[in-house]
Amino acid sequence: MHRLVGIETEYGLVVEGRDASHQMEEAAEVVRSLARKHAPGWDYRAESPRRDARGFTADRLRFDPEDAKLGKPGETFGDAASRSDRVLTNGARLYNDHGHPEYSTPECLSLMDLVAHDQAGERIVQECARVYAKRTGRAAHAIKNNTDHQGASYGTHENYLALRSVPFESYAHALLTFLATRILYVGSGKAGSWRLSEPAYQISQRADVFAEPIGIDTLYRRPLINTRDEPHADPLEWRRIHIIAGDANIQPYATALKVGATCLVLDLVEDGWQPHILLRDPVRAIAQISRDDSYQWPADTDKGPIGAIEIQRQFLNEAEHRYRGRDAQTDWTLDAWKATLDGLEMDPMTLADRLDWPAKLNILRMFLDEDGVEWGSDRLVAADLEYHNVDPDASLFACLETVPLVSEERIEAAMSRPPSDTRAGIRGLIVDRLTDRIEAITWGGVELRTESGTLRVDLNSFVGEPLNDWVTTLRNAATDEELLELLKRGSK
């Protein structure tokens, strides 16, 4: 993988004895329960969520009416106290996003680093829930999913650094067809639907919530392609592809395939390639594919009805032709992508040890064998949610045998240490060594208090250098003063 990537996960939260009117404050309290070393003071001045990649700035962003049910009447959201931002020593960010603890991984170049940091996020959020429960006496459950089964949906967003020189329209043109069919292996499965009574089970939790092919909103009238132009990097050279059309995956294999395959499609677009089969209506297609319990997944394309697996194969075959042998991560992704499409074609249930929706379906079918349990029953909805519970003592997923990707040691390390080959390595080190000096912090920079004034550290300045060497040099600084001098020297 040759692309900077990261995942933002909003966690569902269930607090014993508290209803939706307390959701905002309880989510903030869970985040504040973080017992690990961290830095507050996230700087929002550089963020521009209304700047659109199509060349304009939106007047406003729309909000889901369901969000109005979260919090107390008159309660406001967006100030530093309610967001409760924490930046961790592993370079990640944890905060309260509209009543959901959100964990943003550090930037990763390695696919397996990303998987390890995503799993580290699960454990850190679970730690917060346990500390909160011990402090308040109220049990709190963090759920890594995308729906509360009451009409609300919350996101899992992927971020990919991409070339500014490639027109945004070229990315969007290819991604619309890719993302709508990618749910074949990205979907986390869902018992029922909050819009219709049928089907009993669908493969994606997010497919029902999309209303537009392209747009800047993320909370209402959600688009398959998000147009937010906020690169968190040099805007003259880079853009950030912000993907909201994906489910929260608790299977590490599904996470790796989701991101790895998307990276390869972005590579294809940057090499000038475009798919030869296009969906006529991607928004309609993603919902139809999710709901097709025949598992044939036909879709309406500009070439007529074609199965979603065949549509995915056009991307896979071109990537195989161009990139096979490029590096080990590319070859792993190509192998996993092909094996997954083959398995989906033969029998999706053979993939229950690596994809979420077949794994969950197997579990729910076991509950259906019990007396009085049927599709749509509260018992089945509860089992659906418990599949995603990140508490290993309560999680149904934790009972499964799955394909391992990263070691326990690597996940444990990711909970406290950042990747050393991205700017997150320097951010995490600053949080670890200079916590009390931090005045403001973002993805791209840190403001530090020194005896001579404020030192502004531009983390992007280190990117052109051998970052591993820089991180090693900074870690070896014997004193704070020596570390500050090195940061000053490296930040242009």
Image: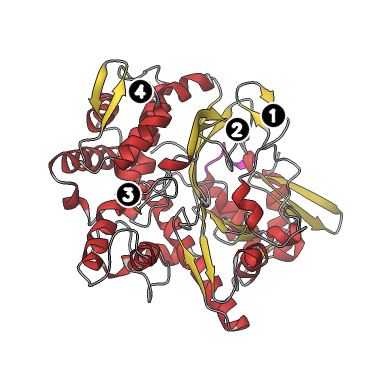
Cα separation between marks 4 and 3 = 24 Å
- The quadrant of the rendering that contains the N terminus is top left
Left or right position of 163 against 78: left
Q: Residue furthest right?
A: 452
Q: Is residue 51 magenta?
A: no
Name the residue that disc number 3 marks.
Answer: 254
Above or below, 357 against 266 in this view is below
Check contact, mark 3 vs mark 1: CB within 8 A.
no
Pair 3/2: label in front:
2
Q: Earlier in the sequence, mark 4 or mark 2?
A: 2
Q: Quadrant of residue 129?
A: bottom right
Cα separation between marks 4 and 1 = 27 Å
Q: Quadrant of residue 435?
A: bottom right
- The quadrant of the rendering that contains the C terminus is top right
Above or below, 77 against 276 in this view is below
Look at label 3 and name its amino acid. Ala
Give the extent of the magenta segment: 461-466
Q: Earlier in the sequence, mark 2 or mark 1?
A: 1
Q: Position of residue 312 (x, y in %)?
A: 28, 30
Cα separation between marks 4 and 2 = 21 Å
**Would you call the spot at circle 4 few (<14 residues within 10 Å), some (14-19), or many (20 or more)?**
many
Name the residue that disc number 1 marks.
Answer: 58
Check contact, mark 2 vs mark 1: CB within 8 A.
yes
Q: Position of residue 72 (x, y in %)?
A: 71, 62
Left or right position of 365 against 93: left
Look at label 1 and name its amino acid. Ala
Look at label 2 and name its amino acid. Ile
Q: Residue furthest left?
A: 346
**What residue is drawn where x is 54% and y is 76%?**
16
Name the residue that disc number 2 marks.
Answer: 216
